[in-house]
Image (cartoon, helix red, strand yellow):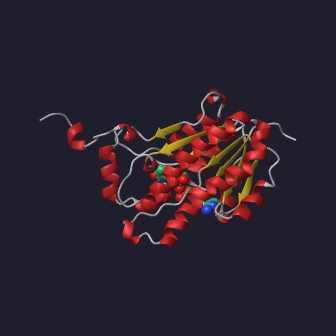
Amino acid sequence: MSTRHVALVTGAARGIGLATAQGFAAQGWRVVLLDRDADELARVVSDLPDATALVCDISDPDAVAASFATLDRLDCLVNNAGVAQFGPIEACDFALWRTIMATNLDGTFLCSQAALPFLKDSRGSIVNVASISGLRASTLRVAYGTSKAAVIQLTKQQAAELGEYGIRANCVCPGPVRTKLAMAVHSQEIINAYHDAIPLNRYGSEAEIAAAIIFLASDSASYITGQVLAADGGFDSTGVGLPALRKGAP
Ligand SMILES: NC(=O)c1ccc[n+]([C@@H]2O[C@H](COP(=O)([O-])OP(=O)(O)OC[C@H]3O[C@@H](n4cnc5c(N)ncnc54)[C@H](O)[C@@H]3O)[C@@H](O)[C@H]2O)c1
């Protein structure tokens, strides 16, 4: 059996998850790509050396248990799968609220719990993917933003409780990235407004978010746990980040 480090990335069929799986593979890790989109997963997994595909909906406890039962080793779990839906509070009915929570929060909890026996063996780590929407409140994302804030707190709970097993837990909060998830909810007006409000004046790339995740999983981060790293072009750092104020005094 291979003793190479193994990373399991959820939501790995595309976007940030796929870039993360590719980044781990480039560094010699064995990767397990998990996603509910079987067709897309089959397409991308064949391009990665020594990669395994797991078709699974992370909001389904039985499916998660069955998927993790197939593992033989795990050194890092990346809880990346997520769904987004933007709309006013009045329009967020309970079914939509539950749909967002079921993947973003319940799925992260379920996968982390299923990974624990393996992570105890390997003294491995968890990297949760939240969002700047979990750090800064904004309009139209009552369920998404709240689910991501909960993922940030879940990370701290995990760090507090799992440290005694040598397991680290950290969180990456991406700023906007032009993935299918973001483009479904970002109009051109929203894109322009983000460019204005972000100190680096641009969206991030999938690879830039992956780099932050892989750093937190690496031995270089061996004394880092319970931390929240915003890979967001400086968006979280801007308090009164009014574009007009940043353009200088009149
Ligand atoms: N793109 C952004 O601007 C942005 C910003 C902040 C945070 N994020 C977060 O980054 C993560 C990845 O987002 P992305 O932009 O790459 O999205 P994406 O939609 O491109 O990819 C998400 C992947 O997750 C899978 N997925 C969704 N629900 C699932 C479930 N229940 N079970 C299994 N797989 C599931 C999808 O099939 C898809 O392949 C998400 O958690 C998202 O909230 C993204």
Image quarter in which the C terminus is found: top left
* Residue 39: image location, x then y, percent: 66, 65
Please tell me in which quadrant of the rendered image residue 87 appears: bottom left
In this rendering, would 142 be left or right of 25?
left
Front in this rendered view, residue 166 or 140: 166
Please tell me in which quadrant of the rendered image residue 226 appears: top right
In this rendering, would 106 be left or right of 131?
right
* Residue 199: image location, x then y, percent: 34, 38
Please tell me in which quadrant of the rendered image residue 202 appears: top left
Image quarter in which the N terminus is found: top right
| 119 to 101, vertically: above or below | above
Residue drawn where x is 37% and y is 70% of the image: 90
Q: Is residue 166 visible?
A: no
| 59 to 45, vertically: above or below | below
In this rendering, would 6 be left or right of 15?
right
Front in this rendered view, residue 78 or 96: 96
Residue drawn where x is 73% and y is 40% of the image: 75
* Residue 37: image location, x then y, percent: 64, 64
Q: Where on the image, by quarter, is ligand 1?
A: bottom right
Residue furthest to the right in view is 1
Front in this rendered view, residue 43 or 96: 96
Residue drawn where x is 39% and y is 41% of the image: 236
Q: Is residue 190 visible?
A: yes
| 115 to 3, vertically: above or below | below
